[in-house]
Image (cartoon, helix red, strand yellow):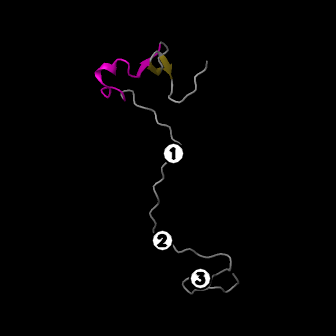
């Protein structure tokens, strides 16, 4: 563009490289974060499995140190997706 160029409304630009943007009431888009981590509530499996499997369902237990951990099939995990040390 050169100095004196016109914008879309026919008005000349104040500067050839800078254009004023009119203030417009805009609705901001909804932003959804896909990097958040979901932690299941402790009761997520209660009443959702057949009675024959309910005793084997994953559950939250309290350790002797007072920590809440998931227990499933004899294995304990502090967080789903956390890599276990072996």
Residue at (58%, 22%) from the top-left corner?
84
Q: Secondary structure at mark 2?
A: loop
Residue 47 shown left or right of residue 16 in the figure: left
Check residue 54 for magenta coloring.
Answer: yes
Label 3: which residue? Answer: 7
Could you give the CA–CA distance between mark 1 and mark 2, rounded to whole angstroms?
29 Å
- Please, is residue 56 above or below residue 80 in the view? above
Residue at (59%, 82%) from the top-left corner?
7
| Nearer to the camera, 51 or 23 | 51
Q: Residues within 10 Å of mark 1 (few under 14, many from 20)?
A: few
Which mark is in front, 3 or 1? 1
Question: What is the magenta range?
Answer: 44-63
> Looking at this rendering, what residue extends furthest in the top direction?
64
The picture places residue 79, in percent across and down from the top left corner, at 51, 27
Label 1: which residue? Answer: 34
Residue 43, located in which quarter of the rendered image?
A: top left
Task: Choose the circle earlier in sequence order: 2 or 3.
Answer: 3
The picture places residue 39, in percent across and down from the top left corner, at 45, 33
Label 2: which residue? Answer: 24
Q: Secondary structure at mark 3?
A: loop
């Amino acid at each position: 563009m050169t100095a004196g160029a016109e914008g879309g409304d026919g008005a000349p630009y104040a500067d050839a490289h800078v254009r004023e943007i009119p203030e417009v009431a805009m609705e901001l888009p909804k932003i959804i974060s896909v990097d958040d981590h979901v932690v299941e509530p402790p009761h997520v499996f209660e009443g959702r499995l057949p009675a024959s499997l309910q005793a084997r369902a994953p559950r939250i237990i309290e350790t002797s140190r007072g920590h809440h951990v998931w227990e499933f099939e004899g294995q304990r995990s502090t967080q789903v997706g956390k890599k276990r040390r072996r």
